[in-house]
Image: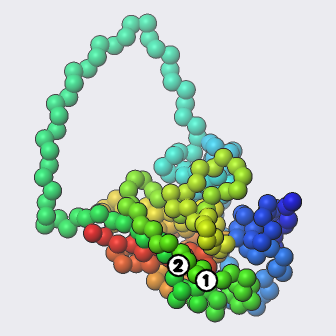
Amino acid sequence: MSATCRNGHVSETTDFCDECGAPMGSAPASSGAAAVPAPQQPVAGPAEVCPVCGSPRTGRFCEEDGHDFVVGGSAPAAPAAPASAAPAAPAAPAAPAAPVAPDPASGTGIWRVAVEADRRYYETVVAREGPDIAAVTFPTYYPRTELTLTGAEVRIGRRRVHGSTPPPQIDLAGPPLDPGVSHLHAVLLPRPDDDGWSVLDPGSTNGTTINYGEDPIALDTVVPLDAGDRVHVGAFTTLVITRD
């Protein structure tokens, strides 16, 4: 059995929309609601489409399947050229590079992120959102998890009930479920100029805030983070950035 949420999404679940996390059965938000509408993003040219699903590009990440146009490209890879009749001679193996000893004065370290339920953040959401948030209760038990930040990106969201889209590296599908988290809510990106990290919101329904701020960060904008910063998503979930 499916139902349609207040934002027009068809959901397989009947308590909260499995697309945007809105409570099912609630009326559309009135003009007096305190939530800040997300700024509109410029739409890229029609020639640039997602190589996974074919949807037009509207930002760095595909709204349908989360494909990263920057890391993954905007078109399928071209087929390999046929091999020539005469194979080329193998190149001589390169000499192994000499190991580089770590420099203790460089200040580099291991960056990590811890995921936890944050009551202070939850209370700010309740105060800001009003009656709609009443259906979301703060969890009595939420196991705190921690992982090391590595790679070209770390996606934050919740896996889809149906479909083949791979789940995010930080999967907030629960239990306990934070219904305010979008399927692709935010992305942590390494900074190219040093060993720090940044956060980007590719277009979440409920926005992403930092350090209990009232205003969400701008969509599709890379925001640098410092050790100790707190990234808030959904109704009660906080990600704490740390550095060893």
Q: Residue at x 70, y 56 (%)?
A: 161
Give the position of the N terminus as an image quadrant: bottom right
Q: CA distance from mark 2 to mark 1?
A: 8 Å
Q: Residue furthest top?
A: 85
Q: Position of residue 76 (x, y in %)?
A: 58, 37
Q: Secondary structure at mark 2?
A: strand
Q: Secondary structure at mark 1?
A: loop
Residue at the disc numbered 1 = 138
User: Does residue 165 appear in this view?
Assistant: yes
Q: Tag 1: residue type?
A: Phe
Residue at the disc numbered 2 = 117
Give the position of the C terminus as an image quadrant: bottom left
Q: Earlier in the sequence, mark 2 or mark 1?
A: 2
User: Does residue 181 appear in this view?
Assistant: no
* Circle 1 crowding by C-alpha within 10 Å: few under 14, some 14–19, many from 20: some
Residue 72 vertical position relative to residue 6 in the rendered view, above or below: above
Q: Quadrant of residue 137?
A: bottom right
Quick check: 118 left or right of 53? left
Q: Tag 2: residue type?
A: Ala
- Tag of residue 33: none
Q: Quadrant of residue 15?
A: bottom right
Is label 2 in contact with label 1 (beta carbons under 8 Å)? yes
Quick check: 193 left or right of 168? left
Q: Quadrant of residue 113?
A: bottom left
201 or 164, which is in the foreground?
A: 164
Q: Residue at x 64, y 66 (%)?
A: 182
Q: Position of residue 77 (x, y in %)?
A: 54, 34
Q: Residue at x 48, y 80 (%)?
A: 210
Residue 125 vertical position relative to residue 98 in the rendered view, above or below: below
Q: Position of residue 52 (x, y in %)?
A: 64, 43
Residue 88 vertical position relative to residue 63 in the rendered view, above or below: above
* Circle 2 crowding by C-alpha within 10 Å: few under 14, some 14–19, many from 20: many
